Image (tube, helix red, strand yellow):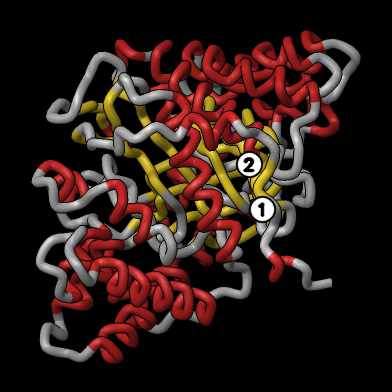
Amino acid sequence: MFSNKDVLDTIAMVEKEHLDIRTITMGISLLSCVRDSAEETARKVYDLVCRKAENIVKTASDLSGEYGIPIVNKRVSVTPVSIITAAFPEKAPLVGKALDEAAATPGIDFLGGYSALVHKATADYERIFIRTIPEVLASTKRLCASVNVGSSKSGINMEAVKMLGEVFKEAATLTKEQDGIGAAKLVAFCNAVEDNPFMAGAFHGVGEGDTVVNVGVSGPGVVKHALEQIPNADLTEAAEMIKRTAFKITRAGQLVAKEAAKRLNAQFGIVDLSLAPTPAIGDSVAAILEELGVETVGGHGTTAALALLNDAVKKGGVMASSRVGGLSGAFIPVSEDIGMIRAAEAGKITLDKLEAMTCVCSVGLDMIAIPGDTPATTIAAMIADEAAIGMINNKTTAVRIIPAIGKKVGDQVNFGGLLGRAPIMPVHECDSSRLIHRGGSIPAPIHSFKN
């Protein structure tokens, strides 16, 4: 139960410190929609999503008004579309466009699940499906896609990695007039999770129930404000403060999640603890790291500070809820964090440093703009590096890279809203094509054999 002090603390976090419920995401199983033809399957998909999600926007609005906590995004995730279109993969775009139209009907912000799981090998139907991703992302507005290319149990599917390098490049090219936003709606994963409520990587795993509500809470500003109250504390005390703050944030998130599930006639799934920044002033993960003592994010000590933050958020959140899941930690997207944007513009943070930081945070190379003439094999090599970090460390890693077609270092892309803006960051010019063209797979590490 919430005490009076809990209520007052929550009000203060909302009014002064940018606390919000970043997303209510309804996961919907599409397995019951499979029919003999793509056309009929698409119709069933459209009808099911419209029916299941018709009240999600109203419910979020009602809960926001009742509890006084802003709910920023209303989203849907679905069964990986490659599974339900396996009999007609070349027509998977029909289902993708039906999903986009279904999302628009109730006013959903994003819909995730135009996805494929190819972490061990790539079936023929999945090769065809993956090649449809660029055109589908270019011709839809709300639809998001993801591909899981590796896991700690199976290793890394380098054929899929090579394909994804080409797919990112094509998705950006087809949407170059919008600064390559097609690539911004695509994620390459290692160890993808089935209950992630955050876009663009959300999908509804086959191990989930028919209809599930997952919630992502967010409060970088709340954590920074808490640390500002103890400017001279040692790092042990700072970690304790972050834990206590994460506990309060998570309690608020679970309250909203359980009530949303009840009203939407769905199961309560999980609360994702991730600190997800926005381009707004005062809502930055980078600012937390700087408050801990790093002069500018990207400087020496950044990875250590991020490790402390990520661990403390998890410990505090797990104490507050028995249903923690998703990615849960701290996100470091460049374009979506004003502190990251400024550090990148000043040349204080590089791709190499961002890669090092992903060893200890929740995701990977996220929302990073690179020169448009970057070879597809170089993008594939970035994906392989991140997948290797995830595979060896038994954690989820991801890549969301935007090749800015026609732009070079010194230029920038601008997506607006939560996706923000990003300076074009330099990449290493050495050739990785021989590694990528070898194909095959990178075997799973020896410590994956735990049976």
Q: Residue at x 51, y 22 (%)?
A: 166
Relative depth, front residue between 354 and 203:
354
For disc 1, the marked residue is 151
Q: Position of residue 75 (x, y in %)?
A: 52, 38
Q: Residue furthest front?
A: 434
Let me know if residue 18 appears in the view. Answer: yes
Left or right: where does residue 296 sit relative to residue 420?
left
Q: Position of residue 256 (x, y in %)?
A: 50, 59
Q: Which mark is residue 373?
A: none
Above or below for 192 versus 129: below
Relative depth, front residue between 339 and 171:
171
Tell me the quadrant of the picture where the C terminus can be found. bottom right
Q: Position of residue 204 (x, y in %)?
A: 68, 43
Image quarter of residue 16: bottom left
The 10 Å Cα crowd at callout 2, few under 14, some 14 to 19, many 20 or more, is: many
Relative depth, front residue between 318 and 211:
318
Above or below for 373 versus 196: above
Whether the residues at callouts 2 and 1 have beta carbons within 8 Å, the answer is yes
Q: Label 2 sits on what residue type?
A: Asn
Relative depth, front residue between 180 and 285:
180
For disc 2, the marked residue is 148
Q: Secondary structure at mark 2?
A: strand
Q: Secondary structure at mark 1?
A: strand
Above or below for 222 versus 236: above
Q: Rounded to the nearest whole Å, what is the CA distance between mark 2 and mark 1?
A: 8 Å
The 10 Å Cα crowd at callout 1, few under 14, some 14 to 19, many 20 or more, is: many
Above or below for 276 versus 420: below
Q: Label 1 sits on what residue type?
A: Ser
